[in-house]
Image (spheres, rainbow, N blue to C red):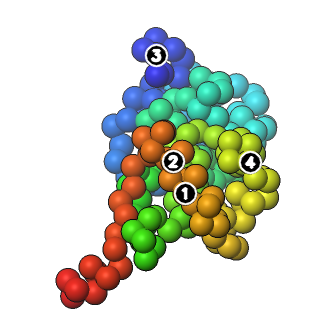
């Protein structure tokens, strides 16, 4: 957890108090929140704004408050943060198992705080496969879906499986 007294703790507090989908801040607004100047690399290197929860303390500040960097506009000197989605709904297959789609795969990956490559290694597939699932190019196979379900249970990833037939009945 971001520690009180660390130089990026005020940023963690700022995001923790927000409950909006998007927050766009200029470099000067971030400096005002921090009460100090951002390092040169924050204004010159897009990589500084990476979403690495197990990385540097500045990234932990927004990620532990359940936000992530979604857009970087270095020319305008502003960063847009997006609230991490915490609730996922997925349709059930005919057998009542979750039908894994791109949004759910990405949600699991972000919940586990992994890159696409790291999740690919965990599942025994290529990074490109994870990318294609997340973009919706195609869906995981039935066997991979079962494994994804096991991984999700192990990681305590919460999602709700909805039966499409019950939706029809309730209308």
In percent of the image, x 20 and y 83: which residue is there? 170
Q: Are marks 4 and 3 in contact (CB under 8 Å)?
A: no
Q: Earlier in the sequence, mark 4 or mark 3?
A: 3
Could you tell me which residue is drawn at 76 percent across and 30 percent down? 41
Q: Which residue is mark 4?
A: 124
Depth check, front residue: 28 or 90: 90
Q: Real-space Cα distance between discs 4 and 2? A: 14 Å
Residue 84 in the image: x percent, y percent? Answer: 47, 49
Look at the numbered disc 3 and give the secondary structure of its residue: loop
Nearer to us in this view, 147 or 16:
147
Spatial separation of the CA atoms under disc 1 and disc 4: 14 Å
Identify residue for label 3: 3
Q: Is residue 84 above or below residue 128?
A: above
Q: At numbered mark 1, what does the secondary structure look like: helix, strand or loop?
A: helix
Q: Which residue is mark 1?
A: 146
Asked if labels 1 and 2 touch by Cβ distance under 8 angstroms, the answer is: yes
Q: Label 3 crowding class (10 Å Cα cut-off): few <14, some 14-19, many 20+?
A: few
Drawn side of residue 106 relative to residue 168, left or right:
right
Q: Position of residue 49 (x, y in %)?
A: 67, 39
Question: Taking 133 as reference, is 116 above or below it?
Answer: above
The mark that comes first in sequence, 2 or 3, is: 3
Distance from the alpha carbon under mark 2 to that under mark 3: 33 Å
Instruction: Give how far apart the Cα atoms at labels 2 and 1 are.
Output: 6 Å
Q: Is residue 117 left or right of residue 158?
A: right
Report the residue marked by disc 2.
Answer: 150
Q: Residues within 10 Å of mark 2 (few under 14, many from 20)?
A: few
| Picture layout, residue 34 above or below residue 112 | above
Who is closer to the viewer here, 40 or 70? 70
């Amino acid at each position: 957890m971001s520690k009180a007294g660390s130089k990026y703790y005020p940023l963690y507090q700022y995001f923790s108090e927000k409950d909006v989908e998007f927050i766009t801040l200029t470099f000067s607004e971030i400096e005002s929140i921090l009460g100090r100047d951002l390092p040169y690399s924050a204004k010159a290197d897009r990589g500084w704004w990476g979403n690495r929860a197990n990385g540097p303390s500045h990234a932990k500040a927004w990620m532990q408050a359940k936000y992530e960097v979604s857009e970087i506009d270095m020319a305008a000197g502003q960063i847009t943060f997006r609230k991490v989605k915490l609730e996922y709904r997925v349709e059930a297959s005919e057998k009542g198992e979750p039908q894994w789609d791109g949004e759910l795969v990405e949600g699991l990956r972000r919940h586990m705080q992994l890159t696409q490559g790291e999740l690919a290694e965990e599942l025994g597939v290529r990074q490109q496969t994870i990318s294609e699932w997340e973009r919706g190019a195609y869906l995981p196979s039935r066997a991979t879906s079962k494994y994804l379900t096991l991984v999700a249970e192990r990681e305590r990833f919460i999602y709700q499986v909805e039966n499409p037939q019950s939706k029809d009945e309730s209308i």
